[in-house]
């Protein structure tokens, strides 16, 4: 999760919503990304989606059952759907998203049935960065 926080910091510095994502497989980081919706002018360029693409390319497989996604913010419904299609083995997130997080819209049922879920890991650190970003925009 520390590596995902580093990615979130990169997003913050680039003027993006500070969300970072890392995918680990066999104890190795195979993807590390951050939000790039502004940079790419693409509403789907969430950290999770970019990480899924990078990990799938790295492994040569669209299925990621043996992988873990670490992400600093609870995924949205779009990202949860993509995680389900990728059959992500485990999802670990930091801060909850009380407005757009997938837990509000069906929760774990939106993920693949075999996906393990862990919430609140480094939640405080993730929240501080997000709050600082939005405070600077007001």
Image (cartoon, helix red, strand yellow):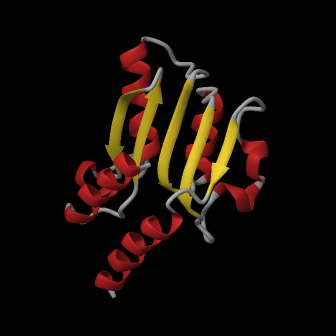
Of 41 and 132, which appears nearest the observer?
Answer: 132
Which residue is painted at 44% across and 65% down in the image? 126
Which residue is painted at 39% across and 38% down in the image? 50
Label tally: 0
Please, is residue 10 above or below residue 132 in the view? above
Q: Position of residue 90 (x, y in %)?
A: 62, 35
Image quadrant for the C terminus?
bottom left
Q: Is residue 36 visible?
A: no
Which residue is painted at 45% across and 30% down in the image? 24
Of 60 and 43, which appears nearest the observer?
Answer: 60
Q: Position of residue 39 (x, y in %)?
A: 23, 53
Of 90 and 2, which appears nearest the observer?
Answer: 2
Of 15 and 58, which appears nearest the observer?
Answer: 58
- Tell whether 37 sits left or right of 24: left
Which residue is painted at 49% across and 13% down in the image? 61
Q: Where is residue 11 in the image (x, y as percent from the top left)?
A: 28, 58
Please, is residue 134 above or below residue 35 in the view? below
Q: Position of residue 67 (x, y in %)?
A: 54, 26
Q: Can residue 105 be seen in this view?
A: yes
The residue sitting at the top extreme is 60
- Tell whether 8 sits left or right of 90: left
The residue sitting at the bottom extreme is 138
Q: Name the image quarter holding residue 111.
A: top right
Please, is residue 11 above or below residue 117 in the view? below
């Amino acid at each position: 999760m520390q590596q995902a926080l580093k990615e979130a910091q990169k997003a913050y510095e680039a003027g993006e919503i500070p969300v970072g994502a890392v995918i680990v497989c066999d104890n190795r980081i195979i993807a590390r990304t951050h939000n790039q919706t502004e940079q790419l002018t693409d509403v789907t360029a969430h950290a999770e989606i970019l990480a899924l693409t990078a990990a799938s390319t790295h492994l040569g497989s669209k299925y990621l059952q043996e992988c873990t996604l670490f992400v600093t913010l609870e995924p949205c419904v779009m990202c949860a759907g993509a995680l389900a299609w990728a059959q992500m083995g485990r999802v670990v997130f930091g801060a909850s998203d009380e407005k757009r997080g997938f837990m509000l819209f069906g929760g774990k049922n939106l993920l693949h049935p075999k996906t393990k879920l862990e919430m609140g890991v480094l939640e405080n650190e993730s929240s501080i960065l997000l709050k600082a970003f939005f405070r600077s925009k007001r």
